[in-house]
Image (cartoon, rainbow, N blue to C red):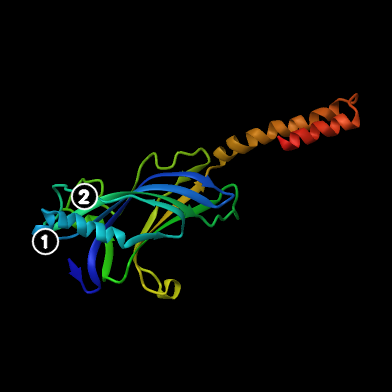
């Protein structure tokens, strides 16, 4: 459908995994499936021109604020519970997101992994939730705005809190042009128990080993020093 600000395009983000959370380089890898849906004529629904329309739409979309990106091709979907006059497709995407780590509350800090999908504003477009292109009550996995899997974040040190998603236009004072955007905030919360298991369980034995030579008076000073330096490099 076409509204006052442009053609409506439905977007669904299915976040499949968050991995390699690097607190030193402040990055995280995110794998997701992106579903896009739009209105189409009867001819576009039954001919290759529909796929071409989806390809052109996908080419206008890009992720910003990422260090690296792998963007797959669109595969057209044909579910039975579309609303009439709809075409849609999905593509696999892998992002290496930049995360501005905040350690003020370490080791119980909360980090924000932000995924920002922008659409070229040259063609008037409004991004909306994909559910607008499915019939009421649809059980299709992409009949929603955002979805995560139970296995999205498998890490002893972190857990994933409820994500937040926003559809709208960017602030022209920040992006020069008001881009149609779908923005997701994934909240990573550090688990105290996971931190203790990963770091404290290693540091504690090393600290005890550092005290061991002090209880051995027969060691020469040079031997004591070499033992402590060896632990330091361990």
**Residue at the location (64% across, 37% down)?**
200
Seen in the picture, residue 16 relative to 4 is either above or below; the reply is: above
**Residue at the location (36% across, 48% down)?**
32
* Left or right of residue 116, residue 7 in this image: left
- Quadrant where the C terminus lies? top right
> Of 176 and 155, which appears nearest the observer?
176
* Left or right of residue 208, residue 83 in this image: left
**Residue at the location (91% across, 24% down)?**
218
Q: Where does residue 64 sit, x and y in percent of width and height?
A: 42, 61
Q: Where does residue 10 sit, x and y in percent of width and height?
A: 25, 59
Kindly state the secondary structure of the residue where label 2 is placed.
Answer: strand
Kindly state the secondary structure of the residue where label 1 is placed.
Answer: loop
Q: Which residue is mark 1?
A: 41
* Left or right of residue 84, residue 149 in this image: right
Q: Which residue is mark 2?
A: 76
Work out whether mark 1 precedes mark 2 in sequence or the reverse, and give the earlier one. Answer: 1
**Residue at the location (53% across, 41% down)?**
157
Count neighbours of disc 2 (C-alpha within 10 A) and say few if under 14, some if 14 to 19, many if 20 or more.
some
- Identity of the residue furthest to the left in this view: 42
Count neighbours of disc 1 (C-alpha within 10 A) and say few if under 14, some if 14 to 19, many if 20 or more.
few
């Amino acid at each position: 459908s076409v509204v006052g600000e442009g053609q409506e395009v439905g977007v669904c983000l299915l976040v499949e995994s968050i991995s390699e959370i690097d607190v030193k380089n402040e990055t995280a890898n995110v794998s997701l499936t992106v579903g896009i849906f739009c209105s189409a004529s009867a001819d576009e629904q039954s001919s290759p021109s529909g796929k071409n329309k989806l390809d052109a739409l996908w080419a206008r979309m890009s992720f910003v604020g990422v260090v690296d990106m792998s963007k797959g091709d669109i595969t057209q979907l044909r579910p039975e519970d579309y609303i009439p006059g709809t075409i849609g497709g999905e593509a696999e995407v892998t992002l290496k997101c930049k995360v501005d780590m905040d350690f003020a509350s370490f080791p119980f800090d909360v980090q924000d992994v932000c995924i920002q999908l922008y659409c070229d504003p040259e063609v008037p477009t409004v991004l909306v939730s994909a559910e607008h292109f499915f019939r009421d009550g649809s059980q299709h996995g992409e009949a929603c705005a955002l979805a995560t899997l139970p296995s999205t974040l498998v890490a002893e040190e972190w857990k994933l809190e409820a994500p937040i998603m926003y559809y709208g236009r960017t602030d022209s004072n920040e992006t020069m042009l008001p881009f149609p955007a779908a923005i997701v905030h994934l909240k990573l919360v550090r688990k105290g128990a996971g931190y203790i298991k990963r770091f404290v369980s290693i540091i504690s034995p090393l600290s005890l080993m550092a005290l061991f030579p002090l209880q051995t008076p027969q060691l020469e000073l040079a031997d004591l020093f070499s033992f402590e330096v060896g632990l330091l490099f361990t």
